[in-house]
Amino acid sequence: MEKFEPNHLRRLLLNGLCCGTGVARVAGEATAAEMAQIGPKRIRKSFGVNCFDFSLGQFLKHGVRRPLARLNELSNFGVPFVRFSISPFWPDEWKLYFENKKFFFDVLDEVFSASEAKQIGLIPTIFWNPVSLSDYHNEGLASWVLDGSRTRSVAKSFIGDVVGRYKNSSSLWAWEVANELNTYLDLPNALTWWAKVNPSRGTPSKRDFRDIPTSKFLRELYVWMEREIHSISPSISISSGFDAPRANAFHLSNGSYTKDSSALRDEHFLSLHPAGVDLMSVHAYPETNSKSPLLLRDEGMFDLKAFVRLAHASSRLLFVGEFGMLSTGNLSADQHKFNEVLDMLVDANVDLAALWVYDFTPQNNSWSIQVGGAREYQLRMLSVTNERFL
């Protein structure tokens, strides 16, 4: 078989030129078999799961089960990939990393080894909570884009260590930059909600302007991160890890609260994804009668198809990095609703999606999905949906 460079093959797939069946298809509707050929990453059209503490839980000694035990369960449900965080969430956890890097990588080695053995893909988020690293160095979020800052220097070393160590792993599907770093962009009152303040975990007692994320900051950060990752592993896919944008994201970046038109929404969201970030990410949580300022929180996730079209038109894939729904206590109604959510994702032609969240003890009473638990049906229904892509 002719070997294609990932971006070249992706363009062929998204333009409908690599069908091999003689059947015309709408641009962007790559088959699962075709997507499986995208570079060495083995990405294929599929729905996986989030397992937030897949590696951190063991590194921080939270009493989680070993990676292979979890993967054995997920394999039984045909789960194709896992999205998870590899870096500490709180500043004081970075202290543990710097004191025992060997143990950190021993744990991560076990995750990759077990995933390779079970042939399950991985999409690790490198800096789930970037502000934790700048907090650790008492520099503020803005330090991420400042040459010569301690935060940037350490981040560069961390990227080099993890990307270089696992760049040839057969289980690696993509690297993700951060988690939902776009949520509070350009909000003048962003510090009301983010970044979190908890001095007992190493954060400052009070935030200031240095921790307010802006669109300009985010563009600079992602250009730098993409360059660093691709300097080590040129063909790997990169996910932004973004949540869905606010309905007025473009106008917020220009000092106004006016709601965006669809064209301005697309223009702004695309501008936050540098060319090398080829997994355009959104998070989708349908809520009945939601008044959330974020898109994709409405019951029908009505803008989802627009994000898919935007990704495909720019020769990228659309990754719904998180989706899910809380239980109402009515199992029959919950199953029906969850099936509707899966159908919406399929109907929108989403390329990849990851269910929130598998086996996460802190959310046992809300989001966590465990085998034998009340929310196990979501894994069963996810399995049926993945069979549709084969």
Image (cartoon, rainbow, N blue to C red):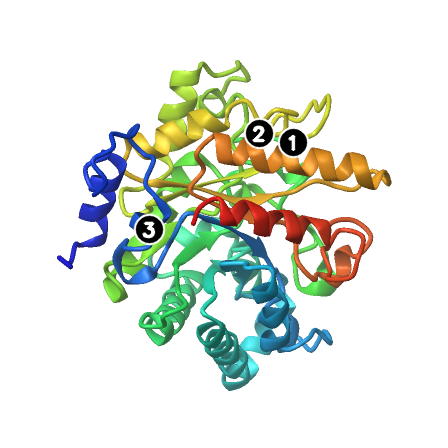
- Say what amino acid the circle numbered 1 marks: Pro
Q: CA distance from mark 2 to mark 1?
A: 6 Å
Tell me, yes or no, whether the two marked residues, 2 and 1, touch with CB atoms within 8 Å.
Answer: yes
From this viewpoint, which residue is outermost toward the front?
A: 22
Image spot of residue 224 (x, y percent) = 32, 52
Q: Which residue is mark 3?
A: 33
Q: Residue at x 79, y 34 (%)?
A: 333
Left or right of residue 261: residue 338: right
- Say what amino acid the circle numbered 2 marks: Leu
- Secondary structure under tag 3 reads helix
Q: Is residue 281 above or below residue 78?
A: above
From this viewpoint, which residue is outermost toward the left?
A: 2
Q: Residue at x 57, y 45 (%)?
A: 322
Image spot of residue 327 (x, y percent) = 79, 42
Q: Is residue 243 above or below residue 88?
A: above
Judge by depth and name the residue closer to the eye, 189 or 41: 41
- Say what amino acid the circle numbered 3 marks: Ala
Q: Residue at x 41, y 69 (%)?
A: 158
Marker disc for residue 296: 2
Q: CA distance from mark 1 to mark 3?
A: 30 Å
Q: Is residue 170 above or below residue 46?
A: below
- Secondary structure under tag 1 reads loop
